[in-house]
Image (cartoon, coloured by chain):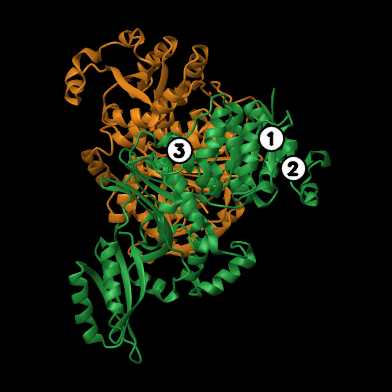
Chain colours: A green, B orange
Amino acid sequence: MKKVGVAILGLGVVGGGTYKILTEHREDYRRTHKIDLVVENVLELRKERALALGVEESKIADNIAVICSNPEVDIVIEVMGGVEPAKTFVLAALNAGKSVVTSNKELFCKYSHELEKAAIKNHCGLFYEASCVGGVPVIRALLDNLQGNKILSMMGIINGTTNYILTKMSREGASYEEVLKEAQKLGYAEANPVSDVEGYDATYKLSILSSLAFHTKIPYTKIYREGITGISVEDIEYGKQFGYAIKLLAIGKNGDNGIEVRVHPAFIPCDHPLASVNDSYNAVYITGDSVEDVMLYGRGAGALPTGSAIVGDVIYCATHTNYRYSTFTNTEDAAPNTKFIENFESAYYIRLEANNRTGVLAKVTSIFSRCGINVAQMIQKDGEGDQVPVIFVTHKTKEHSVNKAVEEINAIPEIAKVAAVIRVVK
Amino acid sequence: MKKVGVAILGLGVVGGGTYKILTEHREDYRRTHKIDLVVENVLELRKERALALGVEESKIADNIAVICSNPEVDIVIEVMGGVEPAKTFVLAALNAGKSVVTSNKELFCKYSHELEKAAIKNHCGLFYEASCVGGVPVIRALLDNLQGNKILSMMGIINGTTNYILTKMSREGASYEEVLKEAQKLGYAEANPVSDVEGYDATYKLSILSSLAFHTKIPYTKIYREGITGISVEDIEYGKQFGYAIKLLAIGKNGDNGIEVRVHPAFIPCDHPLASVNDSYNAVYITGDSVEDVMLYGRGAGALPTGSAIVGDVIYCATHTNYRYSTFTNTEDAAPNTKFIENFESAYYIRLEANNRTGVLAKVTSIFSRCGINVAQMIQKDGEGDQVPVIFVTHKTKEHSVNKAVEEINAIPEIAKVAAVIRVVK
């Protein structure tokens, strides 16, 4: 039986889950794949953590050189997260002739070109299914199943923390701050939640997924980004009245005029399949010119779901001898002549706080009209005092037109001010 | 640039769609994959059909020998359906050293062992993503992504025709017969609908999917099968009152006591992700011990969605040099010692037509109790005349206990007769 040695860099949540899967299923893989997957090393400075998982002391390494020079290690699993020292370690492993399986979205998003170059040079495999959307098989679907298509669009709920927060806010009417606190207590949100709640994590993943979908590197810096910290329970409730659910969406489109990539909160109709993706579940909704609509749904994070994606890659790597590299132009920047659309089209939910309703409607609608914005629906609420909410949902319009209208409305604050602007997917 | 020659056996709906995708995207594949995919032959006796699609006359073959002996053909796409002559043609292609991509679920389900043997002997690839659930990437998810898991269960809506019919019946309150006729007119159901509506098509697909999931060939003859022809609008309406949607489900489970495989109509709770898979959409809901729940959703049939799966396989085949074969014991029968569970557990919806309500309840509940069946919910309806409906939903119980209870109730027909028994997924 072919023996395949594995090393795990980092025994955090995902590393621990991966170790558990590999050791508990070792007999299964011997039987089903005729391979003996053996964890030969772990790189973990917190020795007690490794020992608690059952790792033999002799297998615990405290530096990458031990692993690179261990001839028993064939595949290195990088689950440390962050750019450094992960990048240095992954390059060292590749240059030592080890294949690499990584769950590191930030690293792969920012340096896929460097990593792949090293992998090709050293005839090693480089796998990253676990970098996006945990256990959901989206990378391989894009790489293998959907290659016959021109991918027209992609819409994803690809961050578990924000989906958990928005679901809770919608269900319980609790404020962002309250729910965030609870999520932190439960381990669904980090102590420093910026990367999740401001959408950075989602841009890293969207960069990887849209690079695969659109056959050119999509640098994450090209992705419009807006987080969920400004979402209020009030807007969620009004959204429900229009039949909408709120989600942090990662959107990629490839149209005749160019590529459009963005991460922002959005209202989607309640009967859209993505609307019922709740809690920490994730999903990616892909539309191709042949396959039509495909949705892939599951746990986007967590020790075992992410570990499942990693071990899937490890088994793939161990049972294949020729590795495929990326099917997109894997450079630091987008391929030459790639056009990015910044002034994209969307419908909009716009909530005003109005001082004087009659005057507001006349003024605001004339601003909308001047900016070429057509209103599809409107709600006026009775309110106590002078400040009453007026809510518009527009037809599809250009981002820049809405920005201009908002600016003009805010310039006449004695009449109304814009309290919320949320894009609507129709 | 590497040129890869393709032949298509049969230019029916899927063959035509595949031809269209391959020819319209040829330039794309040259650019993104550095391969030139050329349709070198089509096997189609209705010459005018091939010409109408734009196939050059010189490329139209009228027998398989032409294709097997054409050195320009590297990959043969079989989209004829049915066992013969597809089986003879596929074996001929493999024995001539051509790799094969097939969408033929009946052929692969019944003869995967023979086909694979020929593929291995001739060092050819054998791909069948398109055989199950059209454009939904489920085969490769099982083959590649989820291999780290023990797959515990699988529940699928894997037949588009029956899902279309049941969705229409639920939405419009139209009878099975009416909706079937309409579906036939629209091309969603065949003139002879038996294979779809009686669940045969779903058993072929479940055989393939559960073989992959459970690492042993699951012969389709081992799958319990029940179609949708007995489903009435009345039961669908009562189901809604319990919060259920009706679906034809393909279920595979791998538990401590053995494997359980079955295709039958079932009620599922409306908040289950499968409940909102409507019309001709399909989905497979997979639970693994590491990945937890994953759902793959999309078009389960149709020229372009199925063509998308085929072309995905063709590109994979053209860009890989070592082919992987099945990850299950690919024999005619299940692996030795495989235990199949026939007396499976489920909750049940049971509708009686009762002549005398008071007497019925006493008699029936005593039968239930004698058979070890616990009732979870009951609806009694006021009715005109003597015949009134009484509906029970049971807790989980054994299939054989329900069969016995039904038999006993039907043996006292002056009191009640069983009008419907539908399993409930809880």
Vertical placement of B62 versus A320: above or below?
A: above
The answer to whether the residue labelled 2 contacts the one labelled 1, judged by CB atoms less than 8 Å apart, is no
For the residues bearing labels 1 and 3, Cβ distance under 8 angstroms: no
The image quarter containing residue B226 is: top left
Question: Whole-Å distance between the Cαs marked 2 and 1?
Answer: 15 Å
Question: Which of A3/B300 is in front?
Answer: A3
On residue A330, the disc is: 3
Quadrant in which the C terminus of chain A is drawn: bottom left
Q: Answer left or right for B405 relative to B62.
A: right
User: Identity of the amino acid at label 1?
Assistant: Val
Mark 3 vs mark 2: tell me if same chain.
yes
Same chain for the residues under marks 1 and 3 in the image:
yes
User: Which chain is disc 3 placed on?
Assistant: A
Mark 3 belongs to which amino acid? Asn
Among the two numbered marks 3 and 2 on one chain, the one whose residue lies closer to the N terminus: 2
Q: Answer yes or no: are tags 2 and 1 on the same subunit.
A: yes
Of badges 1 and 3, the one in the foreground is: 3
Query: What residue is shown with label 2?
Result: A63
* Dot placed on the residue nearer the N-terminal end, 2 or 1: 1
Q: Residues within 10 Å of mark 2 (few under 14, many from 20)?
A: some
- Of circles 2 and 1, the one toward us is 2
Mark 2: secondary structure: loop
Q: Secondary structure at mark 1?
A: strand
Please report whichever mark, 1 or 3, sits nearer to the chain's N-terminal start.
Answer: 1
- Image point 56% across, 47% down: which residue? A107
Image side of residue A42 versus residue B296, left or right? right
How crowded pointer 1 is (Cα within 10 Å; few <14, some 14-19, many 20+) is rated as many
The answer to whether any part of residue A127 appears in the image is yes
CA–CA distance between discs 3 and 2? 30 Å
Which amino acid, by three-letter code, is at mark 2?
Asn
Disc number placed over residue A6 in the picture, else none: 1
Q: Which x, y percent locates residue A182?
A: 60, 70
